[in-house]
Image (cartoon, rainbow, N blue to C red):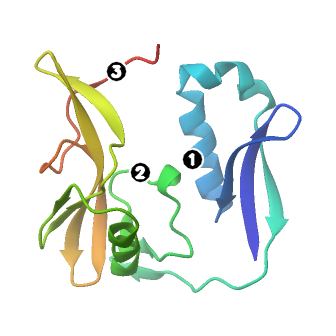
Amino acid sequence: MKVYRVVYGDGIVYRDGIPTPHAANIVMKQAAQRPYMQANLLTMRKQEYNVPGKRRPNRFMGGRQVLNRDYYYADALCPGALVENEVISELIDALPPTYLSSSLFQSGGAYSMREIDGRCRPTYATFQRVDHDTWKYCGACFRGEKEERGEELPYV
């Protein structure tokens, strides 16, 4: 099966194991928004290579693709993306959640810091249950919340 990596310079790997060219393009767009990557953007490109194995096809829900673990790539998720329950189970097994209820899951490690009301607070990758086997990515949200708020802190 084909996978992708995003490289810059003389082949320095920025991200590897990306499952689709669309996801690789999202990773490259996100890198363009990071000030510390500005010097590398002119040489950034994606490379395709093969690894053994086959991917299971994704299912669709309401005309939208639901990513299974073969297509899930955290750095390429955009708010509103749908993922299978198996992806959430693997995230829970990897690191104890920061927040977990029957309808909301937040990963255990802080995703970023945002400023709100003059205070800096951590945000977490947040997923909301849509049905028994499907979750929607809500973005990087404060603990117990499902909407992104606040201002991202500038890179220093």
Q: Residue 78 carries which label?
A: 2
Distance in Å between CA atoms under marks 2 and 1: 9 Å
Above or below: residue 104 compared with residue 29: below
Which quadrant would residue 147 be assigned to in this image?
A: top left
The residue type indicated by label 2 comes to Cys
Q: Where is residue 67 in the image (x, y as percent from the top left)?
A: 46, 72
Q: Position of residue 107 (x, y in %)?
A: 30, 56
Residue at 56% from the left image edge and 76% from the top image edge? 70
Disc 1 on helix, strand or loop?
Answer: helix
The tag earlier along the polypeptide, 1 or 3, is 1
Closer to the camera: disc 2 or disc 3? Answer: 3
Q: Where is residue 42 in the image (x, y as percent from the top left)?
A: 77, 25
Number of other residues with Cα within 10 Å of mark 3, as a class: few under 14, some 14 to 19, many 20 or more: few
Residue at 63% from the left image edge and 40% from the top image edge? 28
Q: Where is residue 137 in the image (x, y as percent from the top left)?
A: 32, 58
Kindly check if marks 2 and 1 are in contact, taking CB atoms under 8 A apart as contact.
yes
Number of other residues with Cα within 10 Å of mark 1, as a class: few under 14, some 14 to 19, many 20 or more: some
Kindly check if marks 2 and 3 are in contact, taking CB atoms under 8 A apart as contact.
no
Q: Which mark is residue 153?
A: 3
The residue type indicated by label 3 comes to Leu
